[in-house]
């Protein structure tokens, strides 16, 4: 039980809102693999080992990406309250087991960009439906590249036809490897459908795969597509890369991922993930080599102009706080 009267000087409702904003981040299969430990002077972000996906994400790389994305939302939620967040990644003995610690760094006014990103947090969602056949303007693509740079990562835009075809093959190959792996299949099945506060519900599943699809999207038991309603022919395809390998780089990449997704949301753009080629180790190595060998591919995204889709569920904040109930403070 933490005896803190206040956390970072936030009132109970503010604290609840800040944590709830963090949980709006994306996570593989909507596992929401994060937890928080609270003290007067800090919010600690921890992984939730019960929400690991040992077959799909054996090294917890994507778990850390998701936690990094939650951390970015947490930073923004504090910014919204004019608090400058001071973040330490992998703080070690300062906060044993934590992926990150966030402290209060004084007052910081909001600029227009931060305002836009804050507004995008509840609006962002993964959109697995076909997008409109409208190209993403180059200025938007540049802004997404800059968003990744701001978080010290690299967003590679897959522009040329040959490279697209190569990436398509890698997605297809990795998709087949996973489709033949019973452990990966059973994780997907376990998190697909209506669950209490997590997982991917039918309304978010997109449309059922068809032979004419150029990109193999993950199948969350999606509904039959209306005849003729196919995927767009030319989505913007990007690969988010870190400059290093390992947990710290993955937490950094998770923050960048969320900054890219939220920036896209501010332009009215939708995104969905095609993670198979970064999840299957041999294909990830092929992708790494195709990017020149010095960047670590972390996430593959398809971006375009989509129609609105419903939100996925989230767990209650109370269930995410380590050791003490939030009820006394929220
Ligand atoms: C690292 C990472 C990888 C993901 N990979 C996939 C994927 O391969 N296919 C997919 O359809 N969704 C993928 N997702 C999206 C999640 O399923 C989605 O974030 C989750 O269901 C919550 O929904 P939301 O993004 O709409 O909030 C991924 C998300 C993250 C963070």
Image (spheres, rainbow, N blue to C red):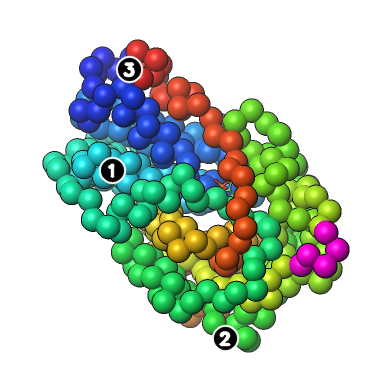
Considering the image in quadrants, where does the N terminus appear? top left
- Return the x and y of residue 123 as percentages of the image width and height: 49, 48
Left or right of residue 144: residue 190: right
The x and y percentages for residue 205 are: 70, 49
Instruction: Give percent across and percent down for residue 295.
Output: 44, 71
Say whether disc 3 or disc 1 marks the residue closer to the N-terminus. Answer: 1
- Give residue 45's quadrant in the image: top left
* Dot 2 or dot 1, earlier in sequence: 1
Q: Are marks 3 and 1 in contact (CB under 8 Å)?
A: no
Vertical arrangement, residue 289 with respect to residue 117, above or below: below
Residue 133 seen in render: yes
Query: What residue does disc 1 label?
Result: 80
Please provide the residue range marked out in magenta.
226-230
Of the numbered discs in the image, which one, if any, rests on residue 160? 2
Horizontally, residue 131 falls left or right of residue 323, namely right
Front-most of residues 86 and 309: 309
């Amino acid at each position: 039980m933490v005896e803190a009267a206040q956390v970072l000087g936030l009132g109970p409702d503010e604290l609840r809102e800040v944590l709830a904003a963090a949980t709006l981040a994306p996570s593989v299969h909507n596992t929401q693999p994060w937890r928080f430990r609270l003290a007067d002077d800090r919010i600690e972000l921890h992984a939730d080992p019960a929400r690991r996906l040992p077959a799909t994400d054996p090294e917890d790389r994507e778990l850390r990406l998701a936690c990094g994305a939650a951390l970015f939302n947490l930073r923004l939620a504090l910014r919204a309250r004019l608090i400058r967040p001071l973040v330490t990644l992998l703080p070690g003995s300062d906060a044993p087991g934590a992926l990150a610690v966030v402290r209060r760094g004084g007052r910081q006014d909001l600029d227009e960009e931060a305002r836009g990103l804050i507004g995008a947090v509840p609006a962002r969602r993964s959109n697995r439906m076909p997008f409109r056949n409208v190209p993403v303007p180059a200025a938007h693509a540049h802004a997404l590249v800059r968003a990744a740079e701001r978080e010290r990562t690299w967003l590679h835009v897959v522009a040329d036809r040959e490279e697209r075809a190569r990436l398509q093959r890698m997605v297809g190959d990795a998709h087949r490897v996973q489709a033949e792996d019973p452990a990966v299949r059973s994780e997907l099945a376990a998190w697909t459908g209506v669950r209490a506060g997590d997982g991917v519900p039918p309304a978010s599943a997109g449309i059922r795969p068809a032979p004419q699809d150029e990109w193999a999207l993950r199948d969350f038991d999606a509904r039959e597509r209306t005849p003729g309603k196919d995927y767009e022919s030319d989505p913007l395809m990007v690969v988010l890369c870190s400059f290093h390998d390992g947990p710290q780089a993955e937490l950094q990449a998770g923050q960048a991922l969320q900054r890219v997704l939220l920036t896209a949301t501010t332009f009215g753009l939708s995104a969905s993930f095609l993670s198979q080629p970064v999840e299957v180790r041999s294909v990830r190595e092929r992708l790494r080599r195709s990017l020149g060998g010095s960047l670590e591919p972390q996430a593959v995204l398809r971006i375009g102009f989509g129609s609105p889709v419903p939100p996925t569920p989230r767990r209650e904040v109370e269930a995410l706080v380590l050791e003490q109930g939030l009820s006394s403070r929220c």
